[in-house]
């Protein structure tokens, strides 16, 4: 990846310059840059840099909201540039950000990566009630349920999901995978989830392993 693209993406996201980010995404893709590499090598480090600045108090909530909007727009463009390889045989995944949590940039990237690898993905969106996740998984008869939690206060929903699945007697019908910045493999083990993935590429690897592929 061209260092200039990485630098421009960082600047566009940190300065929440929507026009610049869109122009950079479109021109890079038109120039033959792989859309997934553009996301992984340029835009993810950019939003992570925003996260660090926010964490250190060097950037404030209104700017964070605008930077997140830029990321959402870029993710949509990158999604559109990916070939639609959906193949029922690869496996079906239901994914959602848990109740009380509106962070969905990372989940969106996981969805892109799963789509690019042929999985059929049902994305329920963000702030989704745990019971609804379970009901939809049963209705759609998916193979894997993936949940994203970005707040330490919402991670508990991933634990609730395991309990509801057990209470309904359907735990063994599904594989579960958890993710999100505060989530760890220890947490996954503690709550009885089948897998944890640290990023979107790892999610593909772990889901393939869960499905024996
Ligand atoms: C962008 C952002 C926002 C945006 C979200 C916009 C959106 N549409 O997503 C906005 C501005 C709305 C926001 C709001 C808030 N935020 Co915020 N936010 C962030 C920030 C800066 C970046 C998150 C992000 O998109 N990262 C980039 C993506 C690519 O990474 P990711 O999400 O981790 O996803 C990757 C992996 O985790 C994994 N993954 C993710 N999901 C899944 C799912 C599965 C199934 C799998 C397998 C893998 C997987 O793959 C992804 C791709 O590689 C983080 C900082 C941080 N370090 O995470 C804070 C952060 C998460 N926010 C925080 C806080 C406190 C808040 C607010 C409470 C702020 C406030 N005072 O109002 C609100 C909460 C709103 C709510 N109820 O949810 C804290 C959380 C602290 C904590 N310990 O709980 C953080 C850590 C910032 C901080 N340092 O304080 N936020």
Image: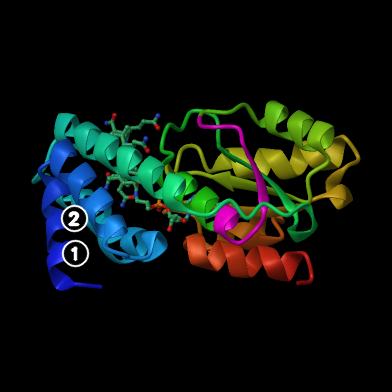
Question: Does the magenta run of residues contain 194?
Answer: no
Q: Secondary structure at mark 1?
A: helix
Q: How far apart in space, not on screen, are marks 2 and 1 (Cα)?
A: 5 Å
| Residue at image coords 83%, 40% | 141
Question: Does the magenta run of residues contain 118?
Answer: yes
Q: Is residue 123 visible?
A: yes
Q: Quadrant of residue 133?
A: top right
Q: Is residue 4 left or right of residue 65?
A: left
Against 133, residue 10 (above or below) is: below
| Residue 28 placement (x, y as % from top left) | 25, 58
Q: Residue furthest right?
A: 169
Q: Nearer the viewer, residue 16 or 127?
A: 16
**Magenta region, residue range:** 114-126
| Residue 209 placement (x, y as % from top left) | 71, 71
Q: Quadrant of the C terminus?
A: bottom right
| Residue at image coords 58%, 53% | 115
Disc 1 marks which residue? 6
| Residue 114 placement (x, y as % from top left) | 58, 56
Determine whether label 2 and label 1 are within 8 Å by CB.
Answer: yes
Residue 48, labelled with which disc? Answer: none
Q: Nearer the viewer, residue 74 or 33?
A: 33
Q: Is residue 73 left or right of residue 99?
A: left
Against 12, residue 101 (above or below) is: above
Q: Secondary structure at mark 2?
A: helix
| Residue at image coords 85%, 36% | 167
| Mark 1 sits near ligand 1, with its Cβ under 8 Å away | no
Disc 2 marks which residue? 9
| Residue 123 placement (x, y as % from top left) | 60, 37
Question: Whereabouts is ligand 1, in terms of quadrant?
Answer: top left
Mark 2 crowd level (few <14, some 14–19, many ≥20, 10 Å Cα): many
Q: Nearer the viewer, residue 5 or 66?
A: 5
Q: Is residue 81 left or right of residue 57?
A: right
């Amino acid at each position: 990846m061209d260092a200039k693209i990485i630098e421009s993406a960082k600047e566009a996201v940190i300065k929440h310059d929507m026009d610049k980010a869109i122009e950079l995404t479109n021109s890079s893709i038109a120039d033959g840059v792989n859309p997934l590499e553009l996301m992984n090598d340029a835009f993810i480090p950019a939003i992570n840099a925003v996260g660090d600045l926010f964490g250190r108090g060097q950037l404030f909530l209104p700017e964070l909201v605008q930077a997140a909007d830029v990321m959402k727009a870029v993710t949509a463009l990158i999604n559109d540039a990916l070939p639609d390889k959906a193949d029922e045989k690869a496996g079906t995944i239901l994914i959602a950000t848990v109740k009380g949590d509106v962070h969905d940039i990372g989940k969106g990237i996981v969805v892109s990566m799963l789509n690019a690898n042929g999985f059929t993905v049902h994305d329920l969106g963000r702030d989704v009630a745990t019971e609804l996740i379970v009901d939809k998984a049963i209705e759609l008869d998916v193979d894997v349920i993936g949940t994203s939690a970005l707040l330490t206060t919402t991670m508990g929903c991933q634990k609730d999901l395991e309990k509801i699945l057990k209470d309904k007697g359907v735990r063994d019908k599904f594989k579960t995978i958890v993710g999100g910045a505060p989530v760890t493999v220890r947490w996954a083990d503690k709550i009885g989830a089948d897998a944890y993935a640290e990023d979107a590429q790892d999610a593909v690897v772990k889901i393939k392993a869960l499905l024996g592929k």
